[in-house]
Image: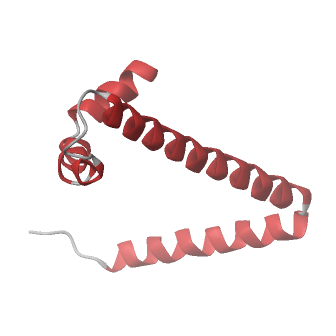
């Protein structure tokens, strides 16, 4: 799974363009050697890790709250059902291209 994610990121042109266009602004041109790039890479990794941890923690918290409250679960089921019904009705109104 890690290899698949790595290959996806490496072959995604948006990721490459981001690193080429945005990140060189933070590298000191007078500095020599790989140290500025290493610091920038570590900074990028740490901020990405913190963001992913926040999303995981927040999702876990919300899931626990929703599973613990049956009334909220019923409301979400009804809202989701209404959304699917309205999408189905909208689909019925469309005509197939001829």
**Residue 27 drawn at (x, y percent):** 27, 46
In the image, what residue occupies the spot 53% across and 40% down?
46
**Residue 74 versus residue 38 in the image, above or below:** below
**Residue 74 versus residue 30 in the image, above or below:** below
In the image, what residue occupies the spot 63% across and 52% down?
55
**Residue 49 versus residue 75 in the image, above or below:** above
> Is 70 or 28 nearer to us in this picture?
28
> Is 94 or 47 nearer to us in this picture?
47
Quadrant for residue 82, please give it.
bottom right
**Residue at the front extreme?**
30
**Residue 1 drawn at (x, y percent):** 46, 21
Quadrant for residue 75, please give it.
bottom right
Q: Please state if 34 lies on the left or on the right of 5 as rendered.
A: left
- Evaluate whether residue 1 shows in this view: no
**Residue 56 drawn at (x, y percent):** 66, 46
Quadrant for residue 38, please give it.
top left
Total numbered circles: 0
**Residue 74 drawn at (x, y percent):** 81, 68
In the image, what residue occupies the spot 34% across and 80% down?
93
Q: Please state if 11 lies on the left or on the right of 69 as rendered.
A: left
- Evaluate whether residue 70 shows in this view: yes
In the image, what residue occupies the spot 54% across and 68% down?
84
> Is 23 or 12 nearer to us in this picture?
23
Q: Please state if 46 lies on the left or on the right of 25 as rendered.
A: right
**Residue at the left extreme?**
98
């Amino acid at each position: 799974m890690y290899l698949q994610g790595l290959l996806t990121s490496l072959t995604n042109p948006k990721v490459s363009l981001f690193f080429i266009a945005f990140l060189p602004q933070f590298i000191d041109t007078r500095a020599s050697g790989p140290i500025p790039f290493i610091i920038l890479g570590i900074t990028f990794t740490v901020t990405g890790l913190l963001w992913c941890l926040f999303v995981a923690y927040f999702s876990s918290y919300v899931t626990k709250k929703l599973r613990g409250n049956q009334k909220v679960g019923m409301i979400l089921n009804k809202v989701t059902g209404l959304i699917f019904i309205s999408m189905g009705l909208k689909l019925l109104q469309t005509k197939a291209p001829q």
